[in-house]
Image: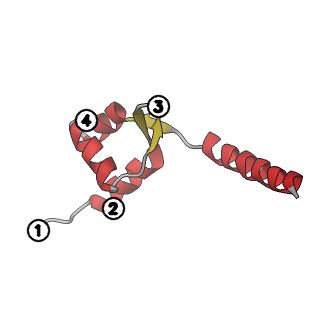
């Protein structure tokens, strides 16, 4: 029973690693440059849950595709 759970965890981990290996992560500074906002604005967006991120040590990394998705969904047509 223990081995079975361990094998399942390994499968999930390997599957996750393959998916994460294909994701490009950006630093907060890189996101701020792309969005043309301050780093503090990006931190606020991450903490508010507007922009998904993972924590690596004491810093955050944001998936590049999530930044582009956020920007595309934020466009507003003006008159």
Which is nearer the eye, 67 or 62?
Answer: 62
Between marks 2 and 1, how big is the CA–CA gap?
Answer: 18 Å
Mark 2 and mark 1 in contact? Answer it, CB < 8 Å: no
Of the image marks 2 and 3, the number of the one nearer the N terminus: 3
| Image quarter hosting the N terminus | bottom right
**Residue found at x 32% / y 31%:** 29
Residue denoted by label 3: 57
Closer to viewer: mark 2 or mark 1 = 2
Closer to viewer: mark 4 or mark 2 = 4
Say few, some or many: other residues with alpha carbon within 10 Å of mark 3 (under 14 / 14 to 19 / 20 or more). few
Say few, some or many: other residues with alpha carbon within 10 Å of mark 1 (under 14 / 14 to 19 / 20 or more). few
Of the image marks 4 and 2, the number of the one nearer the N terminus: 4
* Image location of residue 40, percent across then percent down: 22, 38
* Image location of residue 79, percent across then percent down: 11, 68
Of the image marks 2 and 1, the number of the one nearer the N terminus: 2
Residue denoted by label 2: 73
């Amino acid at each position: 029973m223990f081995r079975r759970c361990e094998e399942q965890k390994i499968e999930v981990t390997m599957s996750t690693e393959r998916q994460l290996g294909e994701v490009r992560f950006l630093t907060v500074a890189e996101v701020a440059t792309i969005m043309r906002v301050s780093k503090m604005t990006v931190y606020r967006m991450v903490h508010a849950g507007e922009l998904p991120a993972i924590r690596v040590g004491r810093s955050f990394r944001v998936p590049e595709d999530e930044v582009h998705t956020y920007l595309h969904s934020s466009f507003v047509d003006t008159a």
